Image (cartoon, rainbow, N blue to C red):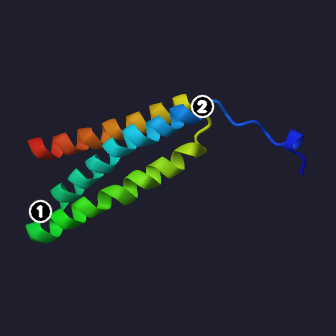
Amino acid sequence: MAAANLPPIRRDWLSKTLAGFVLGAVLALGCSGLFLQFNADMPLSVRGQLAMWMVPPVWLGVLGGVFFFASGLRAWLWLGGAGALVLGALSALRLS
């Protein structure tokens, strides 16, 4: 295939990457906190290790999946909404 037939690189890859990096970290840490809240009956040594080691796969999964969004703005909006939902659930669980 000739180089002229290839589609150009989209200009919003930087926006998508930053959304996955920043909001993916928020989402991963929030999911780790939810895991800690829902598994309070588990011993702390096991629960802490599982919560700590679940952050990188979630974060990298979000960072890898962010390029399926149609635009950088959609990535920021959807991941921001998901992060707000997770952090809201976490704060609601901590208050109750």
Q: Position of residue 81 (x, y in %)?
A: 39, 35
**Which of marks 1 and 2 precedes in the sequence?**
2
If the image is split into quadrants, where does the C terminus sit?
Answer: top left
The location of residue 2, given as percent across then percent down, is 90, 47
Q: Count the marks: how many?
A: 2
Question: Do we see residue 42 in this rendering?
Answer: no
Q: Amino acid at mark 1?
A: Ala
Report which quarter residue 83 is drawn in: top left
Is 51 situated left or right of 79 in this image?
Answer: left
Residue 7 drawn at (x, y percent): 79, 39
Between the residue at mark 2 and the residue at mark 1, the CA separation in whole angstroms equals: 41 Å
Q: Residue at coordinates 54% horizontally, 33% vertically from top-left?
A: 14
Pick out the residue farthest to the front. 3
Which mark, residue 12? Answer: 2
Amino acid type at mark 2: Asp
Nearer the observer, 43 or 19: 19
Identify residue for label 1.
Answer: 40
- Identify which residue is drawn at 25% across, 54% down: 32
**In the drawing, does residue 33 fall left or right of residue 8?**
left
The secondary structure type at the circle numbered 1 is loop
Note whether residue 95 is visible: yes
Residue at 15% x, 71% y is 46
Disc number lying in front (2 or 1): 2
Tell me if 7 is positioned left or right of 61 in this view.
right
Residue at 82% over, 43% down: 6
Pinpoint residue 17: horizontal percent, then vertical percent: 50, 39
